[in-house]
Image (spheres, rainbow, N blue to C red):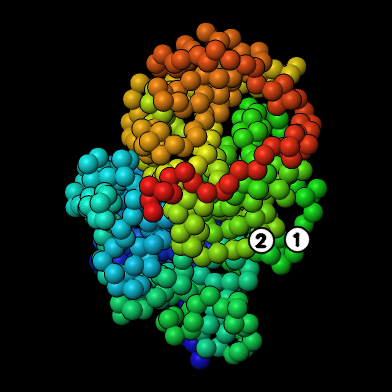
Amino acid sequence: MIDCITPDAAAALLRDGDMVLAGGNGGSGVPEAVFEAIERRFTAGDGPHDLTLFHITGVGALTEKGLCHFAHPGLVRRVIGGNFGMQLPFMKMILAQDVEAYNFPQGVMTHLCRAMAGRQPGVLTHVGLETYMDPRQDGGRMNARTTEALVELVHVADRDWLFYRAPGVPNVALIRGTSADEDGYVSMEHEATAREDLSMAQAVHNAGGIVICQVKRIVKRGTLHPHMVKIPGFLIDHFVVEPEQMQTYTTRYDPARCGETVVPASSIAPDPLDVRRVVARRAAFELRPRDVVNLGVGISAMIPNVASEEGIADLITLTVESGVVGGVPGHAREFGTSVNPRAILDQSYQFDFYDGGGLSCAFLSFAQVDPQGNVNVTRFGKRYDGAGGFINITQNTQRLVFNGSLTGGDFDIGVADGELKIRRDGTFKKFVPAVDQISFSGRLARERGQQVSFVTDRAVFELEADGLVLTEIAPGVRLKEDVLEKIGFEVRISEQLRTMDARIFRNGPMDVHDEFIAKAPRHAGNAAQGEQA
């Protein structure tokens, strides 16, 4: 029989200085009851102290839950994470120099789990070259307190690579599933993501550590179908049963997010026509039939809603780095999951596909853009978000569409009478002479022949050989006052400057289905593949 313990008993197993592999992806797959218990133990004065916390991506609900429970000085000495945007209290600790902090690309993080499971020294990859992951820049270090180099530049097979070192011996894995049978075999039938929980369990088990798995229920021995089992029982030491565990931080249980049911597309209501939807609608014009697409956070995550309203969602394949393939990806607290997924892969396999150039198009956000097309989405102002899957995706995808507002701050911009209405503009510029941190290298993109565009609320830019070129402006927008003066550098204006499609600014479907079908399908591979081969 398996060993079932309480969350507090699980928390008591952690020792000072342990390296903890923490499961979860955004708000899905989080062993929340165990995380809560660890915080209770620490705030009661019982430790643990000086943990090394390793997590694949942001885990939390911005100011609460998830890894926000670990945001206490003294509880964590070092954090190695793929993203911090879902755990703002942790971000404040990084900014205040209260913790050593490394940020590595999400795909590298999930592959490091496999490396640790196989007792390999680390991950060798092209991902991160000429960004702040490169040791010639920051080496993935997020603040001045962080000094040890965990990334090396190496030359192998006649080219440069980055070697990300496995960061130590993992002592504890905190993971989650849906059901465990009496021998401890774990299935994930109600999970919206599969993540890398198997690799985490293997890594800690092979290192002689403790694997703790939170599940919803215990079932009879041998009743789980072997195709549904994700983690063998011999890898897990203790179980915490939490019957009320949420599927995501918003949803208790939606069978359409784990494939138990399929809901009609008509049940997905269109988002309201505001300035964010304007950007998502214009970005959707970049889709092609048979595209295999990745969608980032923010406005980009709203594109599936547009595709659903236009009746073209079934003609493309939308993917999320968490491992979800097909369906309509969610955004906000549902990000990382999908309604009506066609497949839910382990995250590491999704990144094998991404890193190899399998995506044909990707839609992503930006915080800063400079004249050469460099993009910063990882560190700006008091935000130390980190990369997530951004670097894996942007370095390996043929067509890139960056989406966001032209200006930042407290603006009041809307849509009326078929035009964009700028009632109060943003107070700071996002198109700047030099980005604070290079998350995406425009020079490298040009070398690799990637097609790069920037879609904003009022203008569209293309990245060409000499830098950014303005190609479209929105109806109702003044070229000089609303666009050129809001950019922190001179930008070339295309001789074929045109007005954005008027349908974008009208309520109701844009009726683009037929013209979408007429677009010639493009090969889903990546022009950079030849260089990487």
Give me the residue at 41% from left, 39% from top. Answer: 448
Placement of the C terminus among the 4 image quadrants: bottom left
Taking the spot 59% from the left edge, 24% from the top edge, the residue there is 457
Residue 68 pos. (x, y %)? 43, 53
Q: Which residue is mark 2?
A: 342
Q: 262 or 152, which lies in front?
A: 152
Locate residue 281, reporting x and y percent: 66, 32
| Residue that carries the numbered disc 1 in the rendered image | 262
Type of the residue with mark 1: Val
Lateral position of residue 172 relative to residue 512, left or right: left
- Nearer to the camera, 454 or 66: 454
Evaluate if marks 2 and 1 touch, with contact meaning CB atoms under 8 Å apart: no
User: In the shown orientation, is residue 272 left or right of residue 346?
Assistant: right
Question: Looking at the image, is mark 2 or mark 1 nearer the viewer?
Answer: 2
* Badge 2 or badge 1: first in the primary sequence: 1
| Left or right relative to 513: residue 500 | left
Q: Of the numbered discs in the image, which one, if any, rests on residue 114?
A: none
Q: CA distance from mark 2 to mark 1?
A: 10 Å
Q: Is residue 403 visible?
A: yes
Looking at the rendered structure, the kind of residue marked 2 is: Arg
Of residues 456 and 317, which is closer to you in this image?
317
How packed mark 1 is, by other alpha carbons closer than 10 Å (few <14, some 14-19, many 20 or more), is some
The location of residue 297, given as percent across then percent down, is: 53, 43
Q: Is residue 490 above or below residue 90?
A: above
Q: In this orientation, does residue 25 appear?
A: no
Secondary structure state at the residue bearing disc 2: loop
Q: In this rendering, would 246 be left or right of 43?
A: right
- Residue shown at the point (60%, 78%) measured from the top left: 227
Residue at image coords 64%, 51%: 317
